[in-house]
Amino acid sequence: MENARASLSVGEEAAELVAQLDVRPHRAGRDASFYEGFALRGIRVDHIRPGFLSCSFRVPARLTDAEGNLAPGAIANLVDEVGAAAITSQGVPGKVSVDMSISYMSTARVDDELEIISKTLGHKGGYSATHILLKNKATGELVAEGRHSLFGKLQSKI
């Protein structure tokens, strides 16, 4: 129990830095949240077409774990956001995530340049699915592979 508590605790210096952050309210559904801006700052869209998105992302120190690797939660966030963006690129209205499955294959370190590719697999009713790959650009090594399912309102036929 103590090991778990220690691994989740934050030092005084880090707690002070977090307390100083200027987190402003946003309009839900309209503005990016602090979380999205924090996690996605620095991502570049290299290529986009309907149902396909290719991005570059240099791993920042702010998204690493204690060992200096890109944190699994940050990888999950990239799968979520870039997967949803591939669906949005097709002009499909906003949807919510209902399922994500991520295979963590290797690590990415601070300043590693990643290539993130997202492809829409298809749509069935209000359900959409995407496939996302995160690769290290320098080595070609697969960092993670994700499958992301989203659901949204069906459009009225009236």
Image (spheres, grey):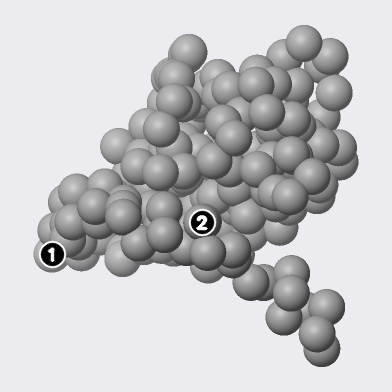
Task: Judge from the rendering whether residue 116 lies leftward or rightward of residue 15; answer left or right.
Answer: right
The dot on residue 87 is none
Disc 1 secondary structure class:
loop
Return the residue nearer the eye: 84 or 109: 109
Q: Is residue 63 above or below residue 23?
A: above
Which quarter of the image is occupied by the N terminus?
Answer: bottom right
The kind of residue on which mark 1 rests is Ile
Can the viewer see residue 145 in this picture?
yes
C-alpha span from label 2 to label 1: 58 Å
> Where does residue 124 sit, x and y in percent of width and height?
50, 56
Residue denoted by label 2: 13
Residue denoted by label 1: 158
Within-10-Å neighbours for mark 1: few <14, some 14–19, many 20+: few
- Counting residues from the N terminus, which is met first, the one under dot 2 or under dot 1? 2
Task: Judge from the rendering whether residue 122 lies leftward or rightward of residue 86; answer left or right.
Answer: right
Disc 2 secondary structure class:
helix
Identify the residue at horizontal 68%, vertical 28% (top origin).
110
Q: Is residue 104 above or below residue 150?
A: above
> Where does residue 66 sit, x and y in percent of width and height?
74, 50
Return the residue nearer the eye: 2 or 87: 2
The kind of residue on which mark 2 rests is Glu
Can the viewer see residue 83 in this picture?
no
